[in-house]
Amino acid sequence: YLWLMPDSKSRKNLKQITDSVSRQFKTIPIEPHLTLLLRLQGTEKNLVEKTRQLAGSLLPIRARLEKIGELQDKARCIFWKAKISEELQNARNQAERVFEATDARGFMPHITPMYAEIGSRQKKPIIAQIQQLVPKECVLDSVWLVKDSGKFGVWPKTAAFRFGTTKK
């Protein structure tokens, strides 16, 4: 997976929310991120090099978080939908070119405060609580390459690069 990561200030704010939700509702603790691409193909060495190349071509992105959404999907149970800005779409397009990949699900940028399999009725009080906490925006300034460990909620980081640089 390819994740866009918030800068330190945005990450701290988002992490406080996700950790609080995780504790309160006994869900998997998560690292706040915006998924850029899923299920990448290639050797680890090749994927790390492509991640480095992508990071070097990107500048920090201001992601505007618009509203809370929900799906019957463990990974997108409840989420903050991000507006598809020109910068965000450009990052997606560049990632598709560099990795020679597309995602059949399309691009729905979002940051998820919790992973869970719960019904709409159970989500209502959670949504009401976190609705007040939706940050207006966050700054994305790095990209992480993470592995699918085969266990939901466990994605080990393979590589991380700040935007505009090829250094880890």
Image (tube, helix red, strand yellow):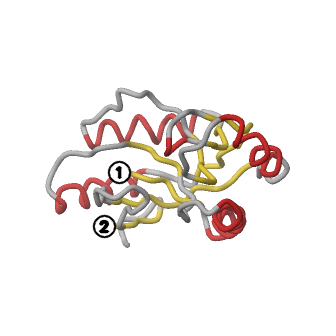
Q: Which residue is mark 2?
A: 158
Q: Looking at the image, which is closer to me, 47 or 71? A: 71
Q: Looking at the image, which is closer to me, 121 or 82? A: 121
Element assignment for label 2 = strand
Q: Which residue is mark 1?
A: 1
Residue 41 % position (x, y): 20, 45
Q: Is residue 109 left or right of residue 153?
A: right
Mark 1 Cα shell of 10 Å, populated few (<14), some (14-19), many (≥20): some
Query: Residue, x 27% and y 43% (percent of image)?
Result: 99
Type of amino acid under label 2: Thr
In primary-sequence order, the first of circles 2 and 1 is 1
For residue 166, what is the image quadrant?
Answer: bottom left
Query: Residue, x 68% and y 54% (percent of image)?
Result: 138
Give the label on residue 49, or none: none
- Measure the C-alpha gap from mark 2 to mark 1: 10 Å
Residue placed farthest to the left in the image? 43
Q: Is residue 4 left or right of residue 71?
A: left
Residue 78 % position (x, y): 63, 43
For residue 165, what is the image quadrant?
Answer: bottom left
Type of amino acid under label 1: Tyr
Query: Residue, x 63% and y 70% (percent of image)?
Result: 8
Query: Residue, x 70% and y 42% (percent of image)?
Result: 123
Question: Total marks drawn?
Answer: 2
Residue 23 % position (x, y): 66, 68
Residue placed farthest to the right in the image? 132
Q: Is residue 97 left or right of residue 31?
A: left
Q: Looking at the image, which is closer to me, 127 or 7? A: 127
Quarter of the C terminus within the rendering: bottom left
Element assignment for label 1 = loop
Above or below residue 134? Residue 21 is below
